[in-house]
Image (cartoon, helix red, strand yellow):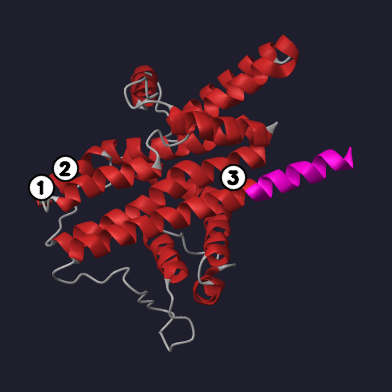
Amino acid sequence: MKFLVILICLVVNHLRSDDCDRLDDSWFFRLRRLTDQALSRFERKRKLPWLVPVIFIYAFLLLALFITLHFVSDVLYGFATMLIHIWVLLVALDRTQPRKLASAFLVRWRDGDFRASLHFLQEEGLIAEGLAFKSDAQVFIHFKEQFIYRCFEKIFVMLFSYLLAGAFGVLFAYVSYQLRYSYKESQHAKREKLIDGIILALEWIPVRLLALTFSLVGNFVLCFDKLRPQLLDFSQRSSSADLYVYATCALSQVAGSGLNIGEPRPIKLDLISKGSDRVIQEGEIEALQALLERSQTIWLAGLALVTLVGLQAF
């Protein structure tokens, strides 16, 4: 069922219109604020540990999903259960397809409007508060980093979580990312640190699987050599910059030419030149987009293979 659910979700997510209900995440932030307000009433009588609101949100949503799945488990021979799984995964997946996100950025980038590009990144939540840029080149490189990480966070991590623990895994990962954004806004240092640790655990395997996938669909030698020192490193959290480095290595065509693998400089990936800059930069975005699409295809093919092997085992 998992392969069918993932396939349906990816198709629906690709075909749905931008004008329809995008299942925005505002409901989660309202829930968190209501939770904080409700629990704050107990502060007058007894001091609650800082961990309680975090545990409550996880427990409340996971319990609600468990109860819902329990009551619909026998409805329509399991079809209702599949619909719940599809709905949960659709909520967690990125509502903006990578191709549409890249196209929307490039429309503003072609015009050379620095302010419009920054405004777009802010609207899409791709710029951290207080981050400043001094040049167009910095904005462009930042978009590429965040473009890769957003696809990783909202597609690859969610797919891996669903394969690992079904709808509960997806909901747990979704809540974790939403809490990270929520607590950054409200400046709860201890809660933010806890959520960062949870996300480190969530991303540890997927980021390495994605880097290996980049190696398979791109420059294997350069990408794998960059990944190998961190393959079993539990101490360091992978960041958007790390994923960007893996992607640039995978797209590099200079294997065996004496490049310093610690500081890859792939052909036409970070080069900001004059004259035909915009054309070159559009090619860079398209190359990253194609890399992510090929990687997603590899993941789907692997899942299909696992599904077939599982069916033959019964």
- Label at residue 115: 1
Residue 287 % position (x, y)? 39, 60
Does residue 242 appear to the left or right of 206 in the view shown? left
Q: Residue at x 36, y 20 (%)?
A: 20
| Span highlighted in magenta in the image | 301-314
Q: Which residue is mark 2?
A: 119
Q: Secondary structure at mark 3?
A: helix
Q: Amino acid at mark 1?
A: Arg
Q: Amino acid at mark 3?
A: Phe
Please report contact status of discs 2 and 1: CB closer than 8 Å, yes or no: yes
Q: Which residue is mark 3?
A: 160
Marks 2 and 3, how far apart at CA:
32 Å
Position of 220 relative to 157 (above/below): below
Q: Nearer the viewer, mark 3 or mark 1?
A: 1
How crowded pointer 2 is (Cα within 10 Å; few <14, some 14-19, many 20+) is rated as few
Considering only order in the chain, which callout, 1 or 3, is on the residue closer to the N terminus? 1
- Asked if one can make out residue 302 in the rendered structure from this viewpoint, the answer is yes
In depth, the one of 43 and 92 nearer the eye is: 92
Question: Which image quarter is the C terminus in?
Answer: top right
- Label at residue 58: none
Residue that sits furthest to the right in the current view: 314
Residue 230 % position (x, y)? 53, 69
Per the picture, the main secondary structure of the magenta-coloured stretch is helix
In depth, the one of 171 and 282 nearer the eye is: 282
